[in-house]
Image (cartoon, helix red, strand yellow):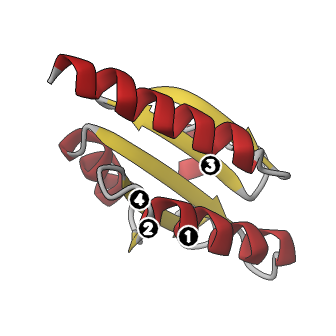
Amino acid sequence: MKKATALLEIQQHLTENRFAVLYVQAQNCGVCTVFHKQVSALLDTLPDIAGIETNIANVPEIASAYHILTAPAVLFFVENKEIWRSARFIDMKGLQSVLEQYLLEYAKFS
């Protein structure tokens, strides 16, 4: 996943990529570290989905821009529109399912 250090960088990434996952973590968060590895591994198997990550301590304005109330948070965007989100305890099966579903559906129309 690409690392972002500014809100504008995240917004550009979401605009430039048809499918994008935003991963937000917090400092000193063990749960964030565990889920980061799992989300990264999942995105490695889905090269059509562009991942971007940030730390809420480095980009605090992300909390208000994307209504992130806790970390970790995973948001999935299709054509810059939020489709799915999960926070604190990430539903990895749900995330994998929705990512694969959208890739399959969009492949039918491409």
User: Mark 2 or mark 4, which has the lower sequence index?
Assistant: 2
Query: x%, y% of residue 100?
Result: 48, 38
Q: Which type of secondary structure does the marked residue at label 3 adopt?
A: strand
Q: Label 3, on which residue?
A: 74
Left or right side of 81 for 31: right
Q: Tags 1 and 2 in contact by the CB under 8 Å rule?
A: yes
Q: Residues within 10 Å of mark 4 (few under 14, many from 20)?
A: many
Query: Considering the image in quadrants, where does the C terminus appear?
Result: top left
Classify residue 45 by image quadrant: bottom left
Task: Give the residue type that dot 3 points to.
Answer: Val
Vertical position of residue 71 compared to residue 41: above or below? above
User: Mark 3 or mark 4, which has the lower sequence index?
Assistant: 4
Query: x%, y% of residue 70?
Result: 79, 50
For this orientation, the residue located farthest to the bottom is: 28
Q: Which type of secondary structure does the marked residue at label 1 adopt?
A: helix
Q: Label 1, on which residue?
A: 41
Task: Give the residue type that dot 4 points to.
Answer: Gly
Q: Label 4, on which residue?
A: 51
**C-alpha span from label 1 to label 2:** 5 Å
Q: Residue at x 55, y 73 (%)?
A: 58
**C-alpha span from label 1 to label 3:** 14 Å
Q: Residues within 10 Å of mark 3 (few under 14, many from 20)?
A: many
Query: x%, y% of residue 11?
Result: 32, 46
